[in-house]
Amino acid sequence: MIISTTAYPRAALIGNPSDGYFGKTIAFVFSNYCASVQLYETPELTLLPSRRDVDSFANLETLCSEVRKFGYYGGIRLLKAAARQFYLYCTEKGIKLPKRNFTIRYDSNIPNRLGLAGSSAIITASLRAMCQFYEVKFSLPELANVVLAVERDELSIPAGLQDRVAQAYNHPVYMDFDRAHMDLYNYGIYEPIEIPQELNLYVAYRTDLAEGSEILHSRLRDDYNAGVPQVLDAMQEWADLTVQLKNALQRKDFGKIPALINRNFDLRCEVCGGSVSAKNRRMIKIAREVGASAKFTGSGGAIIGSYEDEAMFEKLQNTLKEFSVDVIKPQIVCEKVEA
């Protein structure tokens, strides 16, 4: 029997990057792309490579192209770290696992290294598969925490919290990372919310740019830990923007949303201007010139925003295409969340 699981890319609608700093965010996952995992029982535990793990190339140009898209580290490390963290977590919780081995393989068409949480999706899908295989049940906050531990503790990847929450819930989530609640429970206050279908949202991403989030998070963390007033004030403002947008969604007051989205990015530039590349700034600028709102979905390379009508969306697609940017309408995943 083959166990098949999936996980989807994440888009932060508002509030990022305050999620790692006791802030508030709203994020969702969308099914236009996915990471998939297949797992089946075998005598030995085997991790099968995918395209991003190959070490043989046609020539130097191909090697450079693959590194630009996937970085220097493939997906096998994600599977290996996920398996180790799964075992450690189960051991810590006193969960006795059956003595069974498996072979696991993955695939993903999520645009890579563009702020869409593609690595987290691979880890989430692999943990779901291992839970099924060993008949282990994680709560949704637990699943999000284990995925975070894989990246942060196993692989030393600086990361916020919201990606894994949205991917664990498979539903738009309002997240309040209240410090007291985090200290008590080790996770935030997560509230599944509805994003009305009448709200026109787009996601756009570069096809010629891939960059990790490590530099941004490392610099921001240093400034936050040092108590830089501008950074502390920005975290509070990002949280306030999130509350305002949540209220606007509930009232279907869509007219207020573009300004909130735009301010989220403008504040990022004020605080982290040196880490925002010229190409990313231009992508935002072009989208706004068309009339759409625009901010990063994560740490750069992909953006999200609202648009008024189909004519604006078509213009957005045609204009950004000239600058190697694809534009899609995200198919927001809204699975029923278990109580």
Image (cartoon, rainbow, N blue to C red):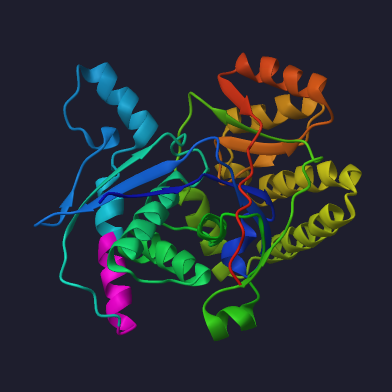
Count how many numbered circles sit on residues in the image.
Answer: 0
Instruction: Kindly identify the residue that appears in the image at 41 percent across and 67 percent down.
Output: 146
Quick one: 300 or 276, which is closer to the camera?
300
Instruction: Kindly identify the residue that appears in the image at 20 percent across and 73 percent down.
Output: 98
Q: Which image quarter is the C terminus in?
A: bottom right
- Looking at the image, the residue that sits furthest to the left is 43
Instruction: Kindly identify the residue that appears in the image at 54 percent across and 27 percent down.
Output: 206
Q: Is residue 6 magenta?
A: no
- Residue 46: percent from left, percent from top: 15, 51
Quick one: 133 or 45, which is closer to the camera?
133
- Residue 204: percent from left, percent from top: 62, 31
Majority secondary structure of magenta residues: helix
The reply, left or right, for residue 35 in relation to residue 228 is left
Quick one: 65 or 339, which is closer to the camera?
339
Q: Residue 255's quadrant in the figure? A: top right
Q: Residue 276's quadrant in the figure? A: top right
